[in-house]
Amino acid sequence: MSLETIHILLNIIMIFAALYLICIGAFTYGLTILSRNYNRDAILRQAKKVSVLIAARNEGKNIEKLLQSLYNQTFDKENFEVIIVDDHSDDDTFGISESFKVSHPEMSLKLLKATGSGKKQAISQALHAADNEVVIVTDADCELPAKWIEKMLAFYIAKDLKMLLGPVLLSPADTLFEKLQVLEHMSLIASTAGSAAIGMPVMCNGANMMYDRKSALNVEKDRTDMKLASGDDMFLMEQFIARYGSKAIGFFLNREVIVKTATMPNLKAFFRQRTRWTSKTKAYTNWKIIATALTVFLFNLSIVFFFVAGFFMPVFWAFYVLYVIMKTLIDYPIIRRISAFMKQKKLKFWTLPLEFIYPFYVVFTAFAGMFTKVRWK
């Protein structure tokens, strides 16, 4: 490789680094705005009824815990219903839910068998079966804080939004593998919050979303992603942005609405999940979402390039280390803020070790998502 070629490559990679810096810097600024202004209690001045939508498949080990956390909500049970659509489970998910319904008659619980296949179809079925004007969505393996509905609804009404996003925390964080998962996921939640705060929402998490039912039904007919295995949350948000604008979407940075879900038990399950997440990228239509994903991918690809090129020209290993350190300095401020919010401050010290691994993980899952067939569970 000639010096001129190396010089051109370094200039291109510097452009990727600059774009990444601008992107993460903007998200960090957005998270700072939320930390200063949004982490306050909104007062519920207007009564609205809520429908909680849940798609469940083979969640026999988790569904009772979820239902109990819904039963424990401080929000008046007369003002919310829970709709669970069982997506062809092979275990006792439906039976456990039925037993809970019988033993807790004071909570409105609708149990439906899926007529379609996959999470998107199940959520759509629940949406059509809902009776209330506001819906809130979570996953069947989640644990919800007691004030989740109450606080989310109060903020949603106070800000006059069409869609409200909330924080999600992986748990536990005992082993090294779990610590790295939690740290990586917190960085995604930080970017979700920060991007929404600057009026450019580019990510969301279907484990904690609230939105207007009528609006969701209106945009559903515009969706072309229903056959894809992933993206029940992202593609819905894309359509909300297209129809109602970015300002109709907000993020509530409040500890009392943090939804918890489990870390993956092993590498195989982890990569299967992350590959499913990245598989939807090729179907995005919002240019801001595409540009953000491309910026992150290209910068991480550049770091992987330096590592591989080092086997042919060892000087590139110096660039590999340099750019990992550069990436760490860019990422650390937003990770420090989100780890403090999530009360996971100790995890921020794993940032540098994660940065040496992260580029390879991003590149691998990106290509795997593009070229392998994925399915929901």
Image (tube, grey):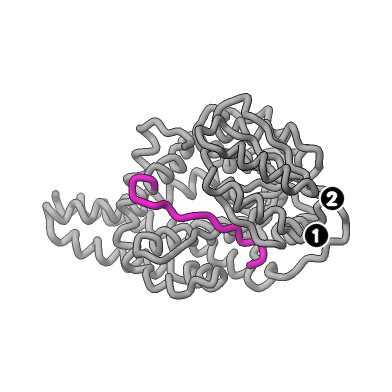
Q: Residue at x 44, y 75 (%)?
A: 346
Label 1 SS: helix
Quadrant housing residue 226: top right
Q: Residue at x 66, y 56 (%)?
A: 69
Which residue is more in the foreground, 286 or 8? Answer: 286
Distance of label 1 from label 2 (alpha carbons): 22 Å
Label 2 is placed on what type of residue?
A: Glu
Query: What numbered label is drawn on residue 78?
Result: 2
Q: Height in image: 66 above or below 286? A: below
Q: Residue at x 32, y 45 (%)?
A: 364
Magenta stretch containing residue 81, yes or no?
no
Which residue is more in the foreground, 250 or 98? Answer: 98
Query: What numbered label is drawn on residue 367?
Result: none
Q: What crowding class fits label 2: few (fewer than 14 Cα within 10 Å), some (14-19), or many (20 or more)?
A: few
Query: What numbered label is drawn on residue 158?
Result: 1
Which residue is more in the foreground, 351 or 15? Answer: 351
Provide the residue span drawn in magenta.
255-269
